[in-house]
Image (tube, rainbow, N blue to C red):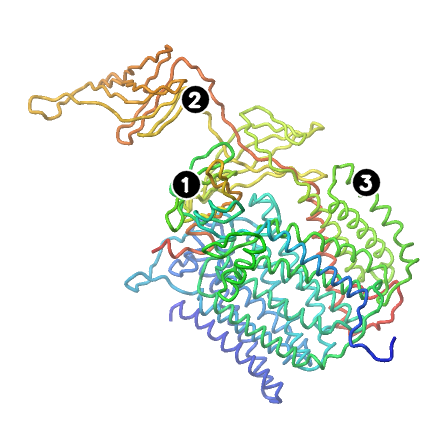
Amino acid sequence: MNLFMFGTLLLVVALVAAFTATTSYTLLIAGQRTALSWGRWSVRIAAVSILVASLLLLALFYFGRYEFDYVYNYSSNDLELRYKLSALWAGQQGSFMIWALVGLLAAPLLLRRSREFEPFVLMPLMAVQVAIISFMLINNPFALRFDVAKQIIYAEDGRGLNELLHNPWMVIHPPILFLGYGLLAIPFAYAIAGLWRRDYDGWVKAALPWTITAWVVLTTALTLGGYWAYETLGWGGYWAWDPVENSSLLPWLTVTALLHGMLVQRAHGGLRRANFSLAIVTYGLVMYASFLTRSGVLGDFSVHSFTEDGLGTTMAAVLVVGLVVSLGIFFQRWRDVPISKLSESLFSRDSLFVLGMFCLVIITLIVGLGTSMPLFSKTPILRDGLRTTFAKAFDIAASQDGRFSLQPSFFRTVTPPFGLVVIGLMTMAPLLGWRGGNIRKFIFALRLPAILAVVATVVGLLLGVRKPLSLAYLGLGSLGLGVNILMIVRTVRGGWMRIGGYAAHIGAALLVIGFVGSSAYSSPDINMTIPLNTTQTAFGHKITFEGYATRTNNQGAEKGVIDLAVQRGDGEVQDAAPQLYLNPRDGQWISNPAIIREWWGDLYISPGKYLAASDPNLLTLAQGQKGSVGPYSFVFQNFDYSLPEDHTGAEAQTDEITIKARLTFYDEAGKATTIEPGLRAVANVGNQPEPYTLADGNQVLISALSLENRQVQLQIVGLDLPVLPERADIFVSTKPAVGLVWVGTVVMTLGGSLAATRRFIEHATKRHAQASVPEAATQAA
Amino acid sequence: MSEVKPRFRLKPLHIVGIALLMLAGWLGFTSMGDSLTPYVNVTEAKASGRNVQVMGYPQNQGTVESGSFRFTMRDEMGQPIEVLYRQPKPGNFDQAISVVAIGAFDESQGIFVADDLLVKCPSKYQEDTQAAK
């Protein structure tokens, strides 16, 4: 049995086992007691099969088995070990493998923990795994490469990994993202379980810790992606509103709303229907995100989307069926779900939570619909309607193709006001009780944070922040920062486990202040060309170009490093070395920026190109090409040479030949004449140029030529143009306050981790606090 | 509270919610007009003054100027257009099968000024089967 069959067999076993598990648990629910052990064993078998399949694929990468199509396309012999192994998730088949693995490793953990929920949770969870494993069987990671004669191709080496992915972030970013996606299946499964069992509150208690964990993991994944883009890809930013980035943001937005809804429900019931729909929609969006990025619908619109692979239809079908079934179950129970009244007062934590969740949903709709435009405008049912509507509304001539997309400016315009509302809510909600609060107390508590906010806004004004929206962000962000610090001080006495939520909000406040600085106030790129050993100034920094060096790394890629010294206003000098290199495998130029970090933000230096020293008095022309030196222009017509003939008419052996280059010469006034400088080649003596003297006394001579390439190099004597030294062409910009983006997300995820830990402990010890707790220690996660 | 229980009473919360929704609708609609980028061919791009996306096949390696890059491409119909991209030449341009230029046609210069360039290569993230055939 060969490895292809073994690998495929593992996938088939996993598929059958997952299907058996789904069926067994369904039977168990229907009352078949014996089905329990069947279900449990099938879950374990599926988990083990996928684990072995993943390890097998990893081994194929490790040993460089290039007869496997997937390995051939994403790996090569010269890759460093860590990238050889990371190549596992470089393409789609492998990323599905990781995704299935996460879900199936979580499943055995849930077997006993979920107690009475077990069959109801594992049934939907395993149904999801059935779908993911079938994607893998459609697009098999163990597929072999065949030639025309159906023979297996045993290649010596693979095509290698895209140079952009040779990066430590490649090792961790994708698996964390899929871990987040896999974990989001758990709240979804619990929601279906809750509906099924008519246990409309219990599922929230059980799923809350998992939901927060999924949120933490997803937040980390998005941050790492942003940091990768910023630090090494040289895209100049951490978030470009690219369709692929946007689609991963969608489930994050809804899971954020979901966990807040769960907190309200935990505290005193309420939002039950909202939480069911959010849990279902979140997982729907995970699937939708994969569909958008993998089906190829965005191929013509996104910088980093996968190309067409034939999975699109299957994924769309799975998504639609899954949503129809889940929502069907939901509407079946719709009238059965009890409603608990929320506070009537707008000025209560209840109402503010609802508004915050509502804002997150609005942002999800904006980003989701905006990103989906290429897909909608391609869908036959919608296409013509959209085309005519928008053509009328915006006075756009309808195009033949009919597809359209929205530029990032759309998202940059529409989302910030809602972010501002969310920040405002984050500021007020902690100070209020669930049912409402004492306004005087509320105002009183705001006094210290208000001072902070005023100071921050004034500082912002002094630093040149003028846009009203940005100032509002700065003020409200710092107010939120102050309030949440205050809440930590108040709650830490009741146990430090309770501060997770407030800490997460502090992180969020820092994050938005960072957003304002680094996006609204990042400078436009300054393009400068610095000659060797000279200094130019940008943003108060003196930048000196100290040289250029290439070094070859172990993959044979030549890395060119532009060596710069950056001197700050106060005299401190730092080295900056942006890199430029050519990947010999696919000819891609890769540039890595250099970042000088300062307390106020970053100085961001992207390499444009390195220009070698050149002599402008020299001009190389191919036949028919036009070029200029100083005031003159030349077009190279052809070479003119004749070999002496002997008496038979054949070419005689000669030791001397004169070659003339026929050129059209345009003088300063643009008048054209034909000139013919020559070159006399004498054997064993060398070349003797025969210059052509122009009307103004300057000379044109041939300094080099190539007959077979039909190229000539001319030298102009007499103009004496200065020789150009080596130059570095760079783009410099500033990214104020960008550090707050990273600090903010770190604080946010740490706070989230703390909250998740607390909820796990709480759920395990089954201490469910009553809703009526004193003001200071309310249930804020 | 009246005797007859209305099924739904408008609360301040609902008013705020509706206001937010209206804000979203208004913002979305107004900025859509500016950021909507149709996918067009060369003839349509020349006729339309707005931001568009044009797919084309590069006809040459292009010329590099200081801080910008210029090349000629033809669309599916074979219509040529000259593109000026105000950024350095993309590293993988020479391997490009096709490119998508995003920008607007400048009638005074008779040139398409691109703010963005998507270069479609044989090996972006997936191998391109067209290239192999």
Q: On what subunit does the disc labeled 2 rest? A: A
Residue A687: name its quadrant. top left
Residue A781 rendering spot, x and y as whole percentages: 78, 63
* Res. A82 in view: no
Q: Are marks 3 and 1 on the same chain?
A: no
**Percent from the top left, x then y, of residue A730?**
55, 34
**Residue B62 seen in render:** yes
Q: Amino acid at mark 1?
A: Thr
Q: Which residue is mark 3?
A: A458
Host chain of mark 3: A
**Which amino acid is tagged 2?**
Asp
Query: From the viewer's perspective, is residue A719 above or below residue A731?
Result: above
Per the image, label 1 sits on a secondary structure element best described as strand
> Which image quadrant for residue A145?
bottom left
Identify the image quadrant of the N terminus of chain A: bottom left
Residue at image coords 70%, 62%: A256
* First in residue order: circle 3 vs circle 2: 3
Mark number displayed over residue A573: none
Q: Chain of mark 1?
A: B
Rendering quarter of residue A430: bottom right
Task: Give the residue type that dot 3 points to.
Answer: Val
* Residue B76 left/right relative to A724: left
Q: Compute the Cα span from label 2 to label 1.
A: 29 Å
Q: CA distance from mark 3 to mark 2?
A: 54 Å
Camera-side mark, 3 or 2: 3
Q: Are marks 3 and 2 in contact (CB under 8 Å)?
A: no
Between A720 and A764, the residue placed more toward the observer is: A720
The secondary structure type at the circle numbered 2 is loop
Determine which residue is flagged by label 2.
A615
| Residue A641 left/right relative to B120 | left
User: For mark 1, what is the residue?
Assistant: B72
